[in-house]
């Protein structure tokens, strides 16, 4: 991505949802692949640099979505730009719509067996012509991975959604993407299948509009505090970086 923005230790692409979709259309048309899509969020600012392979894969991803309000604030503070929030689960939904329209073959990997199965049913109802060629739960043992890769290749999947949570899914994609022979678009979707299957509810529209989805999820799942506690540190780091840049400009 040409105008990728650096946010402390990670990056984000300042595109609108429509622009992301346009990119994905072009990925489908291109010969290369897999094109990798990850969500950028404050937690990854801390987890990604801890692992060199993860860092390189993240840095070289084809698209980095401004997944949460944290990235929107970061771009505002560091670049003075107002960008749209593009949650990973919404991008996944848009890719399914596009895959249905273009008759692309989709494989869904990740989450618990019941969640994966239910999410596939929900997606089939929502997109009746969507061609879901295969699925697998996300608890595949290392010694069975070759079989899974063979299955994905055999189904000639062009879209692969990977729902193993972060950073497990980014590591998986880093390790196996070169073994995926037909996949053109590969998105790390975290807990999206849980949301689609109805096991985890997204915040009501008003909470989303007020940019408070994170607070809603925290109230519903208090154990997320462990992950969200990095947020204040992230904001402090951003403010320090902004000050540093202002000093340099003077
Ligand atoms: N998961 C999995 N295999 C694993 C570990 C996790 O399939 O070895 C799944 C888990 O069942 C859940 C998702 O990965 O569906 C993790 O969701 P989480 O909300 O933690 O991800 P996030 O969206 O925050 O990255």
Image (cartoon, rainbow, N blue to C red):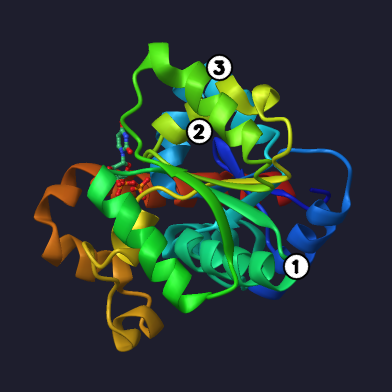
Q: Residues within 10 Å of mark 1 (few under 14, many from 20)?
A: few
Residue with the mark numbered 3: 52
Asked whether the viewer can see residue 86, the reply is no
Residue with the mark numbered 1: 102
Q: Residue at x 40, y 59 (%)?
A: 120
| Cβ atoms under marks 1 and 2 closer than 8 Å | no
Indicate the position of residue 205 as horizontal and vertical percent values: 34, 86
Question: Could you give the CA–CA distance between mark 1 and mark 2, rounded to whole angstroms?
Answer: 27 Å
Residue 88 in the image: above or below residue 145: below
Indicate the position of residue 165 as horizontal and vertical percent values: 36, 40
Q: Which numbered mark, 3 or 1, is in the foreground of this view?
A: 1
Q: Give left or right: position of 207 versus 17.
A: left
Residue 30 in the image: above or below residue 104: above
In which image quadrant can residue 248 be found?
top right
Q: Residue at x 88, y 48 (%)?
A: 30
Q: Residue at x 18, y 61 (%)?
A: 218
Residue with the mark numbered 2: 170
How many circles with numbers are drawn on the protein? Answer: 3
Q: Residue at x 36, y 60 (%)?
A: 119
């Amino acid at each position: 991505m040409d105008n990728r923005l650096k946010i402390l230790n990670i990056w984000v692409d300042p595109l609108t949802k429509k622009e992301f979709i346009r990119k994905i259309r072009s990925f489908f048309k291109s010969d290369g692949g897999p094109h990798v899509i990850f969500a950028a969020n404050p937690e990854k600012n801390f987890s990604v640099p801890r692992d060199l392979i993860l860092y390189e894969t993240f840095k070289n991803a084809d698209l980095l979505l401004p997944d949460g309000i944290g990235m929107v604030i970061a771009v505002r503070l560091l670049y003075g730009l107002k960008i749209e929030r593009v949650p990973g689960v919404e991008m996944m939904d848009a890719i399914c719509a596009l895959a249905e329209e273009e008759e692309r073959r989709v494989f869904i990997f990740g989450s618990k067996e019941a969640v994966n199965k239910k999410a596939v049913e929900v997606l089939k109802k929502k997109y009746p012509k969507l061609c879901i060629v295969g699925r697998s739960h996300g608890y595949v043992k290392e010694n069975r991975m070759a079989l899974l890769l063979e299955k994905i290749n055999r189904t000639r999947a062009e879209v692969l959604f990977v729902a193993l949570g972060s950073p497990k899914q980014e590591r998986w994609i880093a390790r196996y993407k070169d073994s995926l022979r037909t996949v053109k678009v590969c998105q790390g979707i975290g807990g999206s299948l849980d949301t689609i299957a109805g096991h985890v509810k997204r915040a009501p529209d008003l909470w989303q509009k007020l940019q408070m989805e994170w607070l809603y999820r925290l109230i519903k799942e208090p154990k997320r505090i462990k992950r969200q506690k990095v947020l204040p540190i992230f904001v402090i780091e951003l403010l320090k970086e902004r000050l540093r840049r202002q000093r340099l400009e003077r």
